[in-house]
Image (spheres, rainbow, N blue to C red):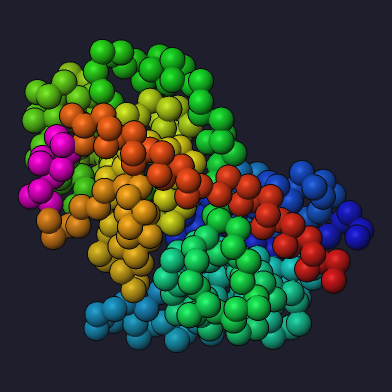
Amino acid sequence: MKQSVNIILSGGGTGGHIYPAVSIANELKDKFPEAKFLFVGAKDRMEMEKVPQAGYDIKGLWISGIQRKLTLKNLVFPFKLISSLWNAHKIIKKFKPSIVIGTGGFASGPTLYMANRKGVKTLIQEQNSYPGITNKLLSKKANKICVAYDGLERFFPADKIIKTGNPVRQDLLTIEGKREEAQAHFNLDLDKKTLVIIGGSLGARAVNNLIEKHINWLVSNKVQVIWQTGKLYYDEFKKYDELEGVKTFAFLNRMDLTYAAADILISRAGASSISELCIVGKPVIFIPSPNVAEDHQTKNALAVVNNNAALLLKESELEMFQTMFKELLNDEKLQETLSGNIKKLALPNATKDIVKEIEKLMIS
């Protein structure tokens, strides 16, 4: 295959769609240094900032999702969709991609749809155990679908499915041995347990409110806290830095050191987060967001919890937090069991395996 190829990647809205796309692009760039890359995202979403920071060009489409409740925004959606389809058509016509890769998010729908119509090969990277409507529709024309969970034959053509796992940041594969560096980076007390809270790149109101409610209790139990509030909530919760051992962040850039520092984690159950946590292999309490399409975060979390590899705390049961956390904190055997079992679910070669599938499509 010629070394110079044109590749479009489309995914965004949240870090869970952006970072897998960037990981795939980085791996492809290592294999094909002369390749040209273009990302397609949604205007005014975080990919328009994060993708250029990763060193790639990006075009923005005027697109958003349909609101699940009756709202004026839904009246604009048909116009956004037509605009996005037309602009995706123009982007594909001008860039002439060899392949288009979709990792989810609003912009990937119009981009992959137009690529399929123009006969360009497409690959879907489905991160969740329960796919959304867009990927179910796109799967009919896609050439390959890379997935992270078993049982997706219910939603996709079985002959197109390849189980690869989800791409993760490569520095997370080597957190062993970074404990001391992490403790120094965060200025941690070596005699205390460390709880890390990850509510997602934008933050999670319910998770932040839960931690605020129990922060004094955590401190009194000699637990130090690394708390990613998300950029939407940082100004509201940064005052808790005044408490001993509490460190708040809008966003954590060194996730390798964050995970290395953790004894216990509290996390949303986005697919990318789960894939990372499987590789990290630390005890986790998942608090899935109930406000996502098809309640897919709960389904993602249950795929881990049902293997006795994590604990689940639903938003409707947050009053159980102290009981659950104290039991986990004081039970080293339970910590070891959860750590060992979640590691068994890890698929650390996901990015390389996805790129192998992309390479096969480009040469076929």
- Residue 348 drawn in magenta: no
Residue 15 appears in the figure? no
Residue at image point 34% right, 65% down: 299
Q: Is residue 37 above or below residue 266?
A: below
Residue 300 appears in the figure? yes
Q: Is residue 45 left or right of residue 74?
A: right
Q: Is residue 203 left or right of residue 168?
A: left
Q: Main secondary structure of the magenta part?
A: helix
Residue 34 or residue 174, whichever sits in front: 174
The image quadrant where one finds the C terminus is bottom right
Q: Is residue 26 above or below residue 292?
A: above
| Number of marks | 0
- Give coordinates of residue 254: x percent, y percent: 47, 31
Residue at image point 26% right, 48% down: 311
What's the magenta region? 318-327
- Residue 326 drawn in magenta: yes
Q: Is residue 202 above or below residue 175?
A: below
The image quadrant where one finds the N terminus is bottom right
Residue 70 or residue 11, whichever sits in front: 11
Residue at image point 35% right, 47% down: 309
Q: Is residue 243 left or right of residue 347?
A: left
Q: Is residue 213 left or right of residue 65?
A: left
Residue 165 or residue 327, whichever sits in front: 327
- Give coordinates of residue 348: x percent, y percent: 58, 45
Residue 139 is drawn in which quadrant? Answer: bottom right
- Give coordinates of residue 354: x percent, y percent: 67, 57
- The residue lying furthest to the right in this view is 2
- Give coordinates of residue 191: x percent, y percent: 26, 13
Residue at image point 18% right, 29% down: 330
